[in-house]
Amino acid sequence: MAKFILGRILQAIPTLLIIAALTFFMTRMAPGGPFDSEKPIPEEIKERIEAHYGLDKPLHEQFFLYIGNLLQGDLGPSFKYVGWEVSELIAQAFPVSAQLGLFSLAIALVLGLPAGIVAALRKNSPWDYVPMSLAMLGICLPTFVLGPALILLFSTQLGWFSPMGWYSMSDIVLPSLTLGLFYAAYIARLTRAGMLETLSQDYVRTARAKGASPSQMVLKHALRGGLLPVVTFLGPAFAGLISGSFIIETIFFIPGLGRFFVTAAFNRDYTMVLGTVLFYATLIILLNLLVDVIQAALDPKARTQ
């Protein structure tokens, strides 16, 4: 197992370096600069500011300086949030995005797993058709449509929940539900597919022939194999719940990392964009590694892949 984990980590290092290089040069190719504004500043002052941040150096020299600082764990200062390091901004905003992701994942699992299990056990019945039809609707309905619809229904019309902010449980419900319903649809379909495949295996039929009760058959035999597709999906799903919350954080005015990233992109805050992208890339790689380890524990054949 240690060799398996070490191999995955070694694969991640060049991936992160490639992501850093692509993001660095793509941000520099965008028109404008971090110190351009509607009210022009004197050219001499602008040159001094750029020299202070090293933006007056050739592009390749800026890149190697950034990589050198990155290897020391320094993401650099933000160009727009004066006096703040990028790492400080990420540390301040990420817990909010992580909370949103965890609440959304909990909703997705609570709704998706039972729906998929019931649909598999009651194949080709209303218990199958109804949840799978709702799951397909959830997949097809984008979050930027579902979010305002939930605000209109549960906040404007019924007044049950707050439409914006991140200060109380009432603020958490709608954004978490918006993200959670989308991923619950995928989890339900994956669970159903995994359970159906496992229920058709010889060892499950043997357990049924030996008189195993439906609950024993599901809990002891079918569930472990049936959940493998879901476990594989959970790593990218949780990373997607966090990194894909940019739109949700904007719609619901949540002070998470997504809003910082969007603001940084509009303001050409190079270091903030780079730091956020690399942070999310590292998070995705680590979550995928965790999923690989769990999958290898559930299915030893996965270690050789």
Image (tube, grey):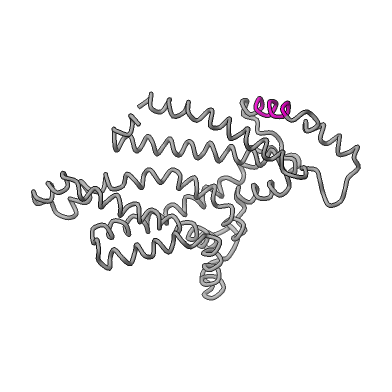
State whether residue 8 is above or below residue 145.
Answer: above
State whether residue 54 is above or below residue 212.
Answer: above
User: Taken as a whole, is the magenta stretch helix, strand or loop?
Assistant: helix
- Residue 238 x, y percent position in the rendering: 46, 47
Q: Is residue 18 magenta?
A: no
- Residue 195 x, y percent position in the rendering: 27, 51
State whether residue 292 is above or below residue 266.
Answer: above
* Quadrant for the C terminus in the image: top left
Q: Name the residue rendered at 35%, 55% in the picture.
A: 189
- Residue 225 x, y percent position in the rendering: 27, 44
Q: Name the residue rendered at 38%, 27% in the picture.
A: 4
For the image shown, how many numbered marks are present on the structure?
A: 0
**Residue found at the far left of this picture:** 210
Q: Is residue 298 left or right of residue 60?
A: left
Q: Is residue 90 left or right of residue 36?
A: left
Q: Nearer the viewer, residue 238 or 200?
A: 200
Q: Is residue 81 left or right of residue 43?
A: left
Q: Nearer the viewer, residue 30 or 11?
A: 30
Q: Which residues are magenta?
A: 60-69
**Residue found at the far bottom of this picture:** 157
Residue 124 falls in image quadrant: bottom left
- Residue 239 x, y percent position in the rendering: 49, 45
Q: Name the residue rendered at 17%, 55% in the picture.
A: 214
Q: Name the residue rendered at 86%, 35% in the picture.
A: 47
Q: Is residue 67 magenta?
A: yes
* Quadrant for the N terminus in the image: top left
Q: Is residue 132 left or right of residue 248?
A: left
Residue 147 falls in image quadrant: bottom right
